[in-house]
Amino acid sequence: MKKKMSLKDSLKKGKVIYGPWCVIPSPSTINVIAATGVDFVIIDMEHGPQGFETVEDMIRAAEVENCAAIVRVAKNDESLILSALDIGAAGVIVPHIESREDAVEAISHAKYYPVGQRGFSPFTRAGGYSLRNVRDHAEKQNRKTMIILLLEGKGGIGNLDDILSIKDIRSKIDIIYIGAYDLSQAIGYPGQVDHPEVRRQLEISIRKIRKKGIAAGGYVAKNDADIQWMTKLGMQFITLMPDCTILFHAFESFYPTLSAKIE
């Protein structure tokens, strides 16, 4: 199997990468999705019911198809971020970033010294389980691990300039993701992601993020026009509909036809 370019390298080269949110706690489902050729899958531990034992198998199921597995942890928590990275996630999405302090905390949890304070253990899947790579484990993980900050509310958007002023942020954060649905609710237009004010806030945020040399991310349902608009703004990390939603609508689309045939 031909090895894909890493997500980090793809972003550095200006490529646009795509992948779905995954809430179904199933390695088999992840394996099917990964086999389609998507660039990444996001295993959602905030809104999905899976525990870390299942997530580890889901990560393996993505990797055998040469697909990167990113874990959205439930909150900006040292233990949750450490566990996700130790079981081999390519990176973490840290939700509910509302301030510079939140961002600094996420970096500290996800990176080893001298960048952060991630708990050190090479005796993990990420560390190869052995003593062979102890000396370079921290440096290697700091280089490989992706950190994605998820800005979902008015606080995060309002403090974006402050977050972007973190020293050497370009070397610490890979992607800043704007949660459009959460943003729409926060500014008084819940669910109206096409509202002019929601779009205006997204445009301003994406331009600021890109100006700092950081990739911008966001969600697209299935509208090609939205994808074109977002990529034209410079968005590179685009997430697609969740696995459960795609499955639901796929079966829903067949039901009227099947029902008519039965009748």
Image: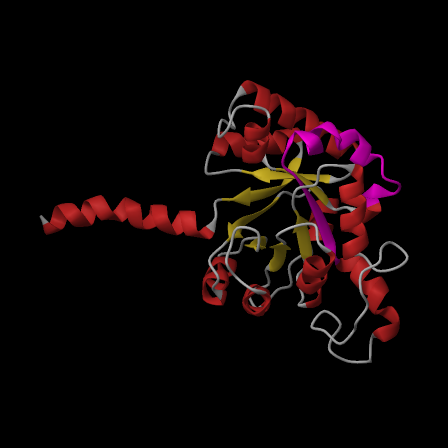
In front of the other: 262 or 1: 262
Which quadrant of the structure image shows residue 69? bottom right
Q: What span is colored magenta in the figure?
A: 145-170
Q: Which residue is drawn at 67% across and 59% down?
A: 80
Is residue 44 toward the left or the right of residue 155 in the image? left
> Where residue 185 appears, x then y in whole percent?
55, 29
Task: Give above or below for 57 relative to 217.
Answer: below
Q: Looking at the rendering, in which quadrant would you find the N terminus?
A: bottom right
Query: Which color scheme is applied?
Result: secondary structure
Which quadrant of the structure image shows residue 207? top right
In front of the other: 177 or 140: 177
> Where residue 42 appears, x then y in whole percent?
57, 53
Q: Which residue lies furthest to the bottom in this view?
A: 131
> Where residue 246 appears, x then y in whole percent?
41, 48
Residue 132 falls within the magenta-colored stretch: no
Q: Residue at x 51, y 44 (%)?
A: 240
Count all numbered tags in the image, as a single digit: 0
Q: Which residue is drawn at 74% across and 57% down?
A: 78
Q: Residue at x 71, y 67 (%)?
A: 86
Is residue 251 toward the left or the right of residue 148 in the image? left
Task: Give above or below for 241 relative to 64.
Answer: above
Q: Residue furthest left?
A: 263
